[in-house]
Amino acid sequence: MTKSDRLRTLTSLSGAAAVAVAVGLAAPGLALAQNQPTGQMVGDHRPAEDIIKDYEAVQVPAYDASRRAEEGYRAEYMAARNEAMLEQAELIGELHTSHPNHDRLTELMPVRWNALMGAGETDKVLAETESLAKTTDNKELKVEALFANANAVARSSNYNPELVGAAAKNFHAAAPDDERNATLLMMTTYYQTDAKLLEETYRTIATDYGDTREGGQAKAKVYHYDQVGKPFELSFEEATSGEPIDMSKLRGKVVVIDFWATWCGPCIAEMPHMKKLYAAYKDKGVEFIGISLDAPRNEEDPSKDGLVKLRDWVAANDVTWPQYYQGNGWQSEFSSNWKIRSIPAIFVVDQQGRLHSPNARGKLDEMIPEMLGIDPIQIEEEETQEG
């Protein structure tokens, strides 16, 4: 199967149930007149040179790192930045309306769409990009419109894999050799629940776009898939007690492996649920092991010492399962050998000490009892306090 055939198959599967997004919507505030001679105005409008001059005169403020700790500075900076970017977007829209074939539109329209999406005007981007992709004779501009449309579909649908897959298919049809196909394909994996399709997507990205950033991420995932069913070997001294831990001694138990760090926001956000799962299943034949990607030791400044941070955090938050402090952050040997490129990353090892799943994040509630052969234990979540 060729590269195009593989991608076409994946996006067809992802988009099978999808409906067209923003079909027939007119682009608010943006006339899409076409087939005008290059440089010719549509109606009575300003010269293109004047519009571009005004666009280039807009100053997007630079972030002042010296004011980082200043209360309210970030909000002030973001408001000024967004205001400038929206002013640029308005001028680019004026240029397209009055000079729809101007040679800088391929460069500038993506700037407009990014600014609008940043301001929460995703619906406007959906409408503009879909209309423009259908009507423009400029192939390069059509490609940019389709890419922006796919990004807008992703944002507006919370990365629904079917909808993003349909938009990715449209982009691939117009630009089959564009490396940004890898970006869009990767977006279809974020909330993909079909395990077979998820693995197929990673393998396609790794094979067809291996030199891209997403290709590197996909190669790591493929490596993990290829280790399923093989022994998961690990031995270390527990970070808080110094007790020796050896996976070979845990045969007969389901072992959850959590690659994490105390500086990792998503890791910390998921820890309360992890603690509840551990409490529910630890006496049923389950063990958890944390593998820390915290910073190296720093005896001169304990506030920057990764081991101190790990010990302090697990003690303060009553995390009682074993912790493996690797000692070298992202460059740590064990996690690097396992090609861990993002955290949290959660593996599950079966009772025979073999890797069962390298993609268990968000699936432990179902996976653990299934592997134990018992009914799921109800995990009560804390109610959000309002007021």
Image (tube, rainbow, N blue to C red):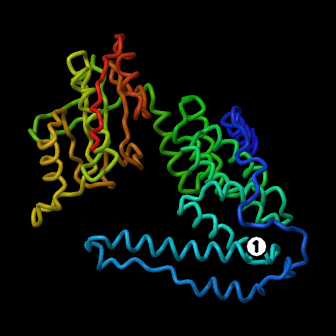
Residue 236 location (% of width, % of height): 20, 38
* Side of 266 where 153 appears, left or right: right
Above or below 332: residue 256: above
Quadrant placement of the N terminus: top right
Above or below 354: residue 83: below
In this view, the residue farthest toward the front is 387
Tell me the amino acid under the disc marked 1: His
Q: Which residue is mark 1?
A: 96
Residue 91 location (% of width, % of height): 66, 77
* Side of 227 where 43 appears, left or right: right
Residue at image position (25%, 46%) is 292
Dot 1: few (<14), some (14–19), or many (≥20) neighbours within 10 Å?
Answer: many
Residue 166 location (% of width, % of height): 70, 42
Above or below 387: residue 278: above
Question: Across the whole image, how many numbered discs are drawn on residues?
Answer: 1
Above or below 225: residue 332: below
